[in-house]
Image (cartoon, rainbow, N blue to C red):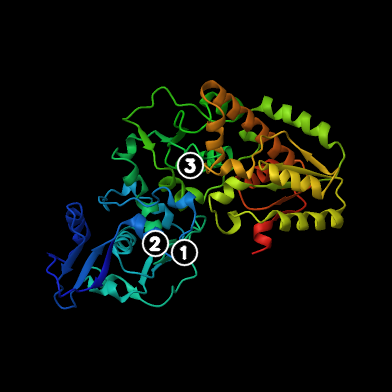
Amino acid sequence: MLQIEEYDDNHNYRRLVNDSQIFHNALQYVLRGETRFHVQNEGSKDFDLVYIDNDKKAKSDVSFPDSDFYRDEIIYPPYYFYDEKDLEKINLYLLDGFEEIFFEDANEYTISVAMLAIKHTSLAVRFKDINVLLFPWLKSQVTIGDKPLSDKAIYVQKNYYSDLTKTDHFSSLSLFHCLFLFQWLTDLPKKQIKYLELSIRRTEGIGSILSSYNKARQALQRHNIKVVLEPNSTRYRQSTLSKYFSVEEAPADMDDTNTIYVKCFNCFILTSFIDRHEANIDLTTLNPVFLQQMKEYADAIIESKKILGVLLRGTDVILANYVGLYRPVNIDACIRIIDERLKQYNYDKIFLATEDSYYLKRMRDAFPHKIIAIAQERHSRDEFKNVKYISDLEKCKSSGGNYYNRVEDNLVNYIYAMYMLARCESLIANCMCSGVNIATAFNGGKYVRKEIASAMLR
């Protein structure tokens, strides 16, 4: 991104003409290694444009999550090339339904988006940053103010903004990326694109895989683009996903002439373009034969008992350094909350879903004769001394065909556990996670109570 800064008299940088192509002209020289440019402005003050890498800018922001999940992979691509005239590959519909767009900051991206809004929408365009007036070809078409005038405004803030579900609030980076996403993804003409192949990191669990897949399908449905998962990109065999879930395999006619290939998971998934959609991991996601087997099992276990479902995410999530709602509450606090609910609502049993052997022991010690648990593979904290994710442990313990069989067994037991949670009267989880989303979706909104301990104890 090119940002506006004070004119530096101490250095003789390349001079640029201040016209509507100024950012594209500067980016040509950025590709040659230049990062600062002089702009001499007739009738107004001179200024400099300074190039800052998008991903570094986001990750240096004080509000950027201090989590390996976000920091280990690029989130914002550099956009050295983009074309405001290629409207087929600009998601302008994201601006529909609003009356105004308000920008806190004047920079390359907010000015480019402002020009799009002026030319192709009826949105009023308003800036808080008076630096927008440095651009003579734009200043007569915008207004200046400290806040939006309309209740139906898109608010574009200067700093990183983490809530990807919002449709009316963005950072300048995130809005630009959502609008120009297709131009980053592919050089193919939009009319040729029939498919998108999504590569998902091998560290992702089945909840993340299914939610990412389903959200992507919804987001691309309006573009008449079908989503398929890249074979062998996840830690599950394609046959395993098709055996237990409604995951389509690659069509026979899919090739380089009609397909977008997404290799950067975070750049695609961690956008409002995707995350505003529902995960929709409900019972229709499951293979009907598999679902019937789980139903018969749950019927036999639960009978007429009043059961509290408890989901405790363990060491792998803690080591990944998630923040806020996604960081697990310590086990002692969870046990206190669970004990209060047992006494308050007189539950017969607790169904516990956890992959952490320590949590299982603590729960059995705290609630003897109350715990029901699926035979999930469980791990101790010592096992995570040299690895970070459960997927890494699976690799260490198995190889070749045994590895995939082990992963499939773990998957089946995990889905059984989520289904059992869904059949409980209420749910308590130590943090927000894909498991909560899956259990809630399987439950179909029937929980009497659903509590996330990390939200309760903030």
The amino acid on which the numbered mark 3 sits, given as a three-letter code, is Ala
Which numbered dot is residue 350? none
Q: Which residue is mark 1?
A: 63
**434 or 355, which lies in front?**
355
Cα separation, mark 1 vs mark 2, equals: 9 Å
Q: Is residue 383 above or below residue 291?
A: below
**Foreground residue among 372 and 286:** 372
What's the amino acid at mark 2?
A: Ser
**Distance from label 3 to label 2 (Cα)?**
28 Å
Q: Is residue 144 above or below residue 123?
A: below
Which residue has dot 2 on it?
Answer: 60
Mark 3 near mark 2, Cβ–Cβ under 8 Å?
no
| Comes first in the chain, label 1 or label 3 | 1
Q: Which mark is residue 216?
A: 3
Helix, strand or loop at disc 3?
helix
Horizontal side of residue 419 vs 404, given as left or right: right
